[in-house]
Amino acid sequence: MNEQLLAVFVSTFTFIFVGCGTLFIEKRGEITFVGVALAWGAFVAANIYTFGHISGAQINPAVTFAYALVGQFPWKRVPMYVVAEFLGCTVASLTLRWIFDGEDIQVMLTQPVGPKPASDLKVAVLETIITFIYIIANCSSRSDSRAFKELGGVAVGATVFFLILLAGKITGASMNPARSLGPAIAAWNFNKIWIYIVSPTIGSVLATTLYFFHLAPAKSKGDGKQADTSFFDVGAMDQLSANNTIDISAISKNLRGISIFQSSL
């Protein structure tokens, strides 16, 4: 469990550090908006391959909640996962604020953008839709036994890339409450933050409900139990942690043996 929480913290920290970091570089004119979208998408994919086997590469509180709601993740782990996700995003945002001291930290925020920003309703609906698409891709490419899971990270990363191209200059393309709240805390600007907490949560719940109750293999539909196909394979992750436990007593015994051998020389 501790390994999983540490992985959640590190994955969310690096996700925000790289993604929001590119926003500062874009502000300087050194990369384009397409480069920013590519950085977000590519790093989501990298996180999946780096942390997927440890924590499910979980970086999104809305997804954690939605998976628990449909029986694909244990409720008892939700609070600690959510805390680790928000903490990772907040620490990363504060770190970026320190590194880019003197620059406009507001660039990290997810807010309606443009000379004529869209209404709150349009922003909320668009955030809900893009989150829905993102989570459907996540569920299908990473959770379904019928899918080619080796390319799950690529599929999810590509989805994030194209969704940011679509909505990034309209809503900020958050799709993640922690991604929005962390920078908001660092900048101490909570303008319209409710949109970026409520909409991704609704989108995630709609996507997981549709997928696991209507599209997933029959054995994982609405049985209230974690499906074998879930990428939050808690049992497997716990087993991995158990198998990788270091035998301290064996190491101590070997060290004592080495000491005795050296003393006899």
Image (tube, rainbow, N blue to C red):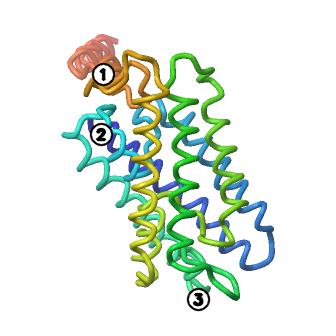
- All told, the count of numbered labels is 3
Q: Quadrant of residue 228?
A: top left
Q: Is residue 183 above or below residue 36?
A: below
Tag 2: residue type? Ala
In the image, residue 28 lies at what x, y percent?
A: 75, 79
Tell me which label, 2 or 1, sits earlier in the chain. 2
| Distance of label 2 from label 3 (alpha carbons) | 41 Å
In the image, residue 175 lies at what x, y percent?
A: 51, 58
Q: Is residue 132 above or below residue 137?
A: below
Q: Nearer the viewer, mark 1 or mark 3?
A: 1
Residue at 45% x, 67% y is 196
Tag 1: residue type? Gly
- The residue indicated by pointer 3 is 102
- The residue indicated by pointer 1 is 235
The disc at residue 68 is 2
In the image, residue 32 lies at what x, y percent?
A: 80, 68
